[in-house]
Image (spheres, grey):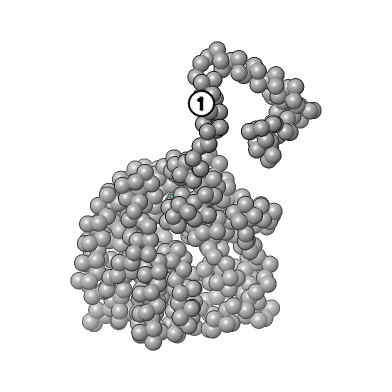
Amino acid sequence: MSTRRQRSAGGVAYPDIKGTLHERTVQALGDQTLRTNLETAASSWAAGQEVMRRDHGMDEMRARAREIRRRNIRDLPALLGEMQANVRKAGGQVVRAADGAEACRYITGLAQARGVTVVAKSKSMATEEIRLNEALEASGIEVVETDLGEWILQLAHQRPSHIIAPAVHLNRGQVAEIFRREAGTDDVPDDREGLVAHARVRLRETFAQAGMGISGVNIGVASTGTVCIVENEGNARLVTSQPRIHVAVMGMERVVADWDDAAHILQILPMAAISQDAANYVNLITGPRREGESDGPEEFHLVIVDGGRGALRGTEFEEVLSCIRCGACLYSCPMWRSVGGQAYGSPYSGPIGAIITPLLEGPSSPASRDLPFMSSLCGACGDACPVGIPLPDLLVRARARASSPATRKSAVAFRAWSLLLRRGLTYRVGVVGWRLFVRVRGTDGWVTRLPGGGAGWTRVRDMPARWPPRR
Ligand code: SF4
């Protein structure tokens, strides 16, 4: 399977959202197919969450999951040291990369040194974050995504739009069209089984050719140096066992202390992510193949990426490090459900993406100014999070960080506003005055233009001139 063949799928009718955040959002909102696809996926997830809560005690499990992740983050330096030591004891190699560039340099250097020409990858948000595929391809190494959703997006030249369901924004017909373009034939069925069978045949070739398998890591267990990879398709099992080298890329915060911690997180993760009480596959990998074993790679490398995470410990944003990347906050967010992940322009979308992307990319990035405002602050994400991250609070803090310092004029205005609201008499006088003002200003019961500082409000919405509004 050549990269050139894979890239022949141009011109397919799928959402390809570009431009600034505002432009991407407007474009996404205008795409009815995209909105239908997202709503279908989110509604099915929501129905499953009801079952998880009612029949599987998911709500009761949250408190323990939160305690585990908070403790893990508090103890992170020690856990990372223990993890490293145990991976080495099991015969693996460990690299700590300060940033994505360092991680990419190590992995491309390793591939070149071992004469690898084809890499098989399983799903990994960390590798999306560090742009590993681009680095490998720039070194002349072919990369094939083997997760079905990721492969679809690779063929469509798109980036994932969801943490665990990368092609959730596409429907079956769109996927069939992408496959037909790539295969150069109309002879690809568009029923679910037919599409999966087509992908399976095409991807099996890759496992036979690949000299290196690259995976992400859902959880690293410090006490044994084991990496846990959760999946639903079985491709990660092949990626981590068929090629002679396995490289696992792990964000530094993904370590837990022991198997008690791991068991709880491995249970709540699929519940929150896909509304199932167990994942289809949980791969537990400790070092490379040992003497006498028939499966597994000859070499195992664990690349632990900091990428700005370490600096978040001890700050008001520390709790984002507890994230187990389940995607529940995305499905629960009315903004994400309306525009999808691609509009965010970052591997991490939805509420967690709106918080973590600016933190990882730095205060001067465009994401830092815009993304924290991609939320209605309705609180649904906080309720959905299985590890109890206070996402709405963190979004407000991220907004405060993104806003320019108050001008003298706005400071005076807010001071006057605060004085007005704090006293009963001035509040009541203010309300009566405001009612009169909007009534005089309204036309047909609505105010469509306010002067001065109110102009921004009425530029995108009308205001009722009396209450209740008359339509
Ligand atoms: S913030 Fe919570 S809900 Fe969102 S992906 Fe992370 S763990 Fe899941």
How many marks on residues? 1
Please name whichever residue, 382 or 10, is drawn nearer the observer in this view of the structure: 10
> Dividing the picture into quarters, in which one does residue 383 lie?
top left
Q: Amino acid at mark 1?
A: Arg
Picture coordinates of residue 70, whole percent (x, y): 31, 47
Picture coordinates of residue 56, whole percent (x, y): 40, 47
**Residue 163 appears left or right of 34:** left
> Dividing the picture into quarters, in which one does residue 224 lie?
bottom left
Which residue in the rendered view is the most extreme toward the bottom? Answer: 115
Picture coordinates of residue 469, whole percent (x, y): 71, 27
Task: Give the answer, above or below, for where 69 lies relative to 428.
Answer: below
Can residue 35 be seen at all in this image of the molecule? no
Please name whichever residue, 171 or 412, is drawn nearer the observer in this view of the structure: 412
Q: Which residue is mark 1?
A: 415
- Secondary structure of the residue carrying tag 1 is helix
Residue found 45% across the figure and 63% down from its top: 129
Residue found 30% across the figure and 75% down from its top: 300
Task: Give the answer, above or below, for where 193 lies relative to 324.
Answer: below
Residue found 53% across the figure and 36% down from its top: 407
Can residue 105 be seen at all in this image of the molecule? yes
